[in-house]
Amino acid sequence: MAFQSYLTAPRLFRQLNDMGYSFADKTVADIGTGLGILPYLLKNENALNIIGIDIDKNSLMAALSTTHAENIGFINADGHNMPVKDCTFDIIFLRYIFQHVNLSACFLSEIKRTMKGGATLVAIDVDDSLNVFYPDLPDSSKKLFKAYFEYQNLKGGDRFISKKLPAFLSSTGFSEIKVKPYATVFFKEKDDRFHFQALKNAFLLVQNELEIIKNELFNRKLIGRLEFHKGLNDYFKFLNSEDNLFISKTEFLIMCKK
């Protein structure tokens, strides 16, 4: 998730700038901040305070070591129970959170508690049903990704969450809901050797997430060790194929008001 944040935070920042959103004199929260990439990008935007919140102490220690600014702070806490006063934040970011955690009214109630009246919530998440690969993924890689999806479901997450978020936000009292889909599209022509970095990033993103949880996948018997490594190796070969390659991944930016 940290690597996903690293790759996508600059794009989110550009989109908000395109919308004309001003961070000047705002108090900002980034829940699930990971390595603090978004706070780092926001440090020169004249925000009053930028608070990164994450349950992972190691990620926050890395964030502290790389982000030095008087208006940035970090809190080690679960988003379900934050040591923050009521009506603190002008804008809250929830990036790639709901694919990992239960979509619950309790969680959103805690988010809403910390928001000022009229504050903005910005959520970004995935819907893997809209992913397109041509040619098709190897069967071994499909099996690996299926095991990953099943694992996230067992933990309360949902890889198809984005389509469900607007209705859930509305049902929990948020208003002025705006949804913007955006696709990351990649096309490599046959024998094209100039897209190495994009292919490397695509592979590292998947490898990073799977390596973190592989032992849990094995312990839960969702996939065997040999199947895991074959699926990952075949995905690497797929991305580095000498044939034409088309990949499209669609995510959703959802903004709403308290």
Image (spheres, rainbow, N blue to C red):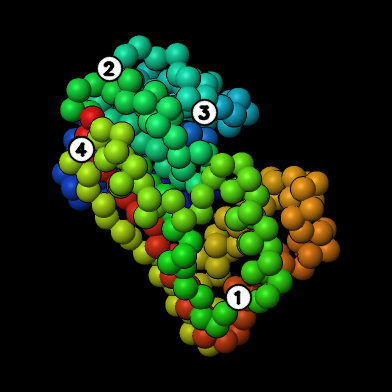
User: Where does the image place residue 168, in percent across and percent down from the top left?
Assistant: 34, 42
Residue 32 lies, in percent from the top left, at 48, 34
Mark 1 → mark 3, Cα distance in angstroms? 34 Å
Q: CA distance from mark 2 to mark 1?
A: 47 Å
Quarter of the view holding residue 250: bottom left
Residue occupying image coordinates x 67% and y 58%? 147
Q: Residue at x 43, y 67 (%)?
A: 130
Q: Earlier in the sequence, mark 2 or mark 1?
A: 2
Q: The residue under label 3 is which amino acid type?
A: Asp
Which numbered circle lies on residue 175? 4
3D distance between C-alphas at marks 3 and 2: 19 Å
Q: Which residue is mark 1?
A: 137
C-alpha distance separating marks 2 and 4 = 17 Å
- Quadrant in the picture for residue 90: top left
The label on residue 87 is 2
Q: Nearer the viewer, mark 2 or mark 4?
A: 4
Q: What kind of element bears circle 2?
A: loop
Given the image, on which type of amino acid does mark 2 rest? Answer: Cys
